[in-house]
Image (spheres, rainbow, N blue to C red):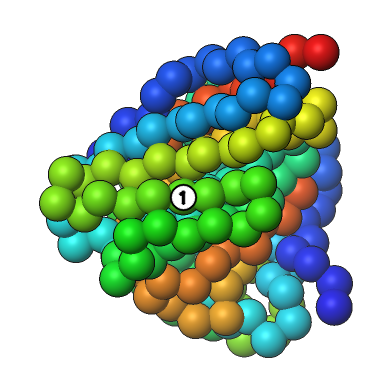
């Protein structure tokens, strides 16, 4: 059973470009979470999605950031008009159901904005 | 809002000795308390978790204790080994979990 897949593993963008980060949850998991991690810091919750629904986006910046988890295909975290402050590691996790179930993390995408 | 405090931020322990990492949380509705280990360049890996109806849980050299009244929980690693060197994160929550800032554990030879 393959784990959580994320791609790309490394992404370099220039200021003003768009970044698209993909996450394929573990087989059978219908819940996806996105986190951002700055160097030497913990994981900051961004958004929690189920198939075709955003459940909690309280950690998402109000502008430029969006996330989706379509019926078919991976979850996408999209950052428009990237700025240097967006440089971070972005991790996706999946779980089979909500409420007290462990989250399985992917290897992360390291975004660098030049 | 919800907050999870984790201490210490860095911990150096002689190989074979025990390591203890402590966390406190603010949201009394939290019912799930996982601990993650993150090695350099990798995603966090769950090492142990505890739920609010249990006070202590052990898995080989790793144990976790929970005090819901005081809203704190701890990770204990006994007989530490070089491969235990990593960053450890506590977390607390219910349908959403909030992470602590991490503890960088160094196992000294």
User: Which residue is depicted at the point 85% across and 72% down?
Assistant: A2
**Label 1 crowd (10 A; few <14 / some 14-19 / many >=20):** many
Task: Please name whichever residue, B88 or A72, is drawn nearer the observer in this view of the structure.
Answer: B88
Q: Is residue A9 left or right of residue A51?
A: right
Residue A26 picture location, percent across and down? 72, 74
| Percent coordinates x, y for residue B57 in the rendering | 48, 60
Q: Nearer the viewer, residue A71 or A107?
A: A107
Q: Which residue shows up at 60% across the image and 47% down it?
A: B62
Where is mark 1, residue-wise? B64
Q: Tell me if I can see residue B51 in this picture.
A: yes
Residue B37: quarter of image? top right
Relative to B48, is A13 on the left or the right?
Answer: right
Kindly identify the residue that appears in the image at 38 percent across and 75 percent down.
Answer: A99
For the N terminus of chain A, the image quarter is bottom right
Q: Total number of numbered labels?
A: 1
Q: Is A27 on the left-hand or right-hand side of B17? A: right
Element marked by disc 1: strand
């Amino acid at each position: 059973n393959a784990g959580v897949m994320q791609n790309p593993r490394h992404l370099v963008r220039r200021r003003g470009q768009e970044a698209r980060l993909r996450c394929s949850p573990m087989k059978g998991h219908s819940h996806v979470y996105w986190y951002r991690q700055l160097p030497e810091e913990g994981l900051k919750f961004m958004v929690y999605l189920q198939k075709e629904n955003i459940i909690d986006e309280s950690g998402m910046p109000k502008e430029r950031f969006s996330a989706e988890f379509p019926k078919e295909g991976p979850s996408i975290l999209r950052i428009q008009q990237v700025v240097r402050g967006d440089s971070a590691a972005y991790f996706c996790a999946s779980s089979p159901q909500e409420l007290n179930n462990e989250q399985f993390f992917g290897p992360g995408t390291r975004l660098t904005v030049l | 809002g919800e907050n999870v405090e984790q201490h210490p931020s860095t911990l150096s322990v002689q190989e074979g000795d025990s390591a203890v990492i402590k966390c406190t949380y603010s949201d009394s509705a939290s019912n799930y308390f996982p601990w993650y280990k993150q090695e350099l360049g990798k995603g966090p890996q769950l090492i142990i978790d505890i739920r609010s109806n249990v006070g202590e849980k052990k898995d080989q050299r790793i144990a976790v204790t929970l005090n819901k009244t005081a809203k704190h929980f701890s990770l204990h690693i006994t007989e530490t080994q070089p491969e235990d060197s990593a960053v450890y994160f506590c977390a607390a929550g219910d349908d959403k979990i909030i992470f602590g800032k991490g503890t960088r554990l160094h196992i000294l030879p």
